[in-house]
């Protein structure tokens, strides 16, 4: 019996070493010290031993049972400790992820796209020209000679005597007409530069130029195209007002206002209580300009228009300070 007890102990301790999870320990525990376990069975057999052997064997068997119970408990605790460590290191897959900072198009880029798309649907083609421009294209070919007072309208950045940062996108008209004959139907977005900086001016700003030339183009076509533009960029209720104006390269010329998109004409701070907002310059292409590019002034007529993109975006989104567009404040830019 004594030997039997020793053998059982050896076997049980050996078995514990080979166990790889808490369930394994529990199975072993049942097998040895459970109600139907090996050790329990041995304890029952003690009553069948000769009386003088009973106390000693009983003591040994009970001590063995206790040692094994302790060993099983220790093994279980070891697994628990491992588990705790794993839990501490664990990746909590229920935590919300860290969001990636997503880029987006600058509001002025978005507005430029939107404006160009309106005109593309009307059959206009997008063209571009250089920011650094010859005096000739920026002024002279547009009927603004060197000593012309209209030059005062543009506070020009001069690179040299004959080279400027373009003050508007109108030089693109000249470049296009020089290189192709009518019909012409172009929309030309791009940066423009003027020595000017306040709440409604930045030294660099964006314009979109439009030009349409072919036989029988009238002021009515200009009105129709610009009305479509206003309806698509703002809404169908947006009405236009044409006021006589002056540009050296168009005759007649007009400044075009839209019904205030904020107050609908009732009068508010944005429209200075006039009910109208100035958004565009336009007119019929001046014959002197056609002559510069060699177009037949008896055969062709055309209209041109130009607008500031920031201004359209400011009206559309109710922004009061143009400089916000160029401060690179993400809190501002992320709203578009
Ligand atoms: N280029 C003019 C400006 O910058 C706008 C304009 C374009 C006016 C075309 C008439 C025709 O003020």
Image (cartoon, helix red, strand yellow):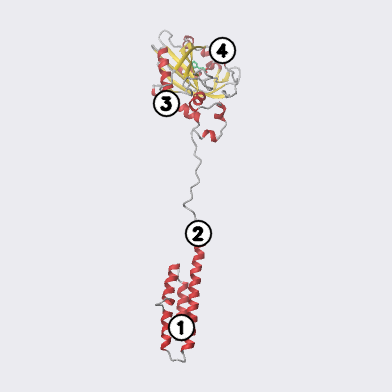
Q: CA distance from mark 2 to mark 1?
A: 39 Å
| SS label for mark 4 | helix
Q: Is residue 181 visible?
A: no
Q: Position of residue 70 (x, y in %)?
A: 50, 74
Q: Is residue 118 visible?
A: yes
**Can you tell which mark lies on residue 208?**
none
Please tell me which of labels 3 and 2 falls first in the chain: 2
CB-based contact (under 8 Å), mark 4 and mark 3: no
- Which numbered disc, 3 or 2, marks the residue closer to the eye? 2
Q: What residue would you read off at disc 2?
A: 87
- SS for tag 2? helix
**Eye-nearest disc, 1 or 3:** 1
Q: Earlier in the sequence, mark 4 or mark 1?
A: 1
User: What residue would you read off at disc 3?
Assistant: 117
Q: How busy is the neighbourhood of tag 2: few (under 14 within 10 Å), some, or many (20 plus)?
A: few
Label 1: which secondary element? helix
- Determine the CA span between mark 4 and mark 3: 32 Å
Q: Quadrant of residue 134?
A: top right
Nearer-the-camera pick, 90 or 175: 90
Rendered position, 94 above or below 75: above
Q: Position of residue 222 (x, y in %)?
A: 42, 15
- The mark that comes first in sequence, 1 or 3, is 1
Is label 4 within 8 A of ligand 1 (CB to nearest ligand atom)?
no
Quadrant position of residue 221: top left
Per the image, the residue denoted by label 1 is 5
**C-alpha distance separating marks 4 and 1:** 116 Å
| Image coords of residue 90 (percent x, y) | 50, 57
- Give the number of the disc on residue 150: 4
């Amino acid at each position: 019996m004594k030997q039997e007890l020793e053998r059982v102990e050896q076997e049980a301790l050996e078995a514990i070493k080979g166990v790889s999870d808490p369930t394994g320990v529990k199975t072993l525990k049942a097998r040895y010290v459970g109600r139907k376990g090996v050790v329990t069975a041995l304890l029952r057999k003690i009553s069948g031993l000769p009386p003088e052997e009973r106390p000693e064997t009983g003591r040994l068997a009970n001590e063995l049972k206790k040692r094994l119970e302790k060993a099983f408990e220790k093994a279980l605790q070891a697994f628990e400790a491992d588990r705790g460590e794993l839990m501490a290191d664990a990746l909590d897959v229920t935590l919300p992820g860290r969001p990636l900072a997503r880029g987006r198009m600058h509001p002025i880029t978005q507005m430029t796209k939107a404006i160009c798309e309106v005109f593309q649907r009307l059959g206009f083609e997008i063209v571009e020209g250089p920011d650094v421009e010859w005096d000739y294209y920026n002024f002279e070919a547009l009927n603004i000679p060197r000593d012309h007072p209209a030059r005062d309208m543009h506070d020009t950045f001069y690179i040299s005597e004959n080279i400027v940062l373009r003050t508007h996108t109108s030089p693109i008209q000249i470049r296009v007409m020089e290189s192709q004959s009518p019909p012409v139907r172009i929309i030309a977005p791009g940066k423009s530069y003027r020595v000017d900086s306040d709440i409604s001016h930045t030294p660099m700003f964006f314009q979109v130029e439009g030009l349409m030339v072919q036989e029988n183009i009238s002021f009515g076509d200009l009105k129709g195209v610009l009305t479509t533009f206003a309806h698509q960029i703002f809404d169908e209720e947006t009405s236009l007002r044409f006021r006589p104006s002056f540009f050296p390269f168009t005759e007649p010329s007009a400044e075009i206002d839209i019904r205030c998109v904020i107050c609908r004409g009732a009068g508010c701070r944005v429209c200075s209580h006039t009910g109208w907002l100035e958004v565009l310059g336009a007119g019929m292409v001046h014959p002197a300009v056609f002559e510069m590019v060699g177009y037949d002034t008896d055969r062709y007529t055309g209209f041109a228009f130009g607008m500031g993109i920031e201004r359209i975006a400011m009206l559309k989104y109710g922004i009061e300070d143009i400089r916000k567009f160029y401060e690179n404040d993400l809190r501002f830019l992320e709203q578009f």
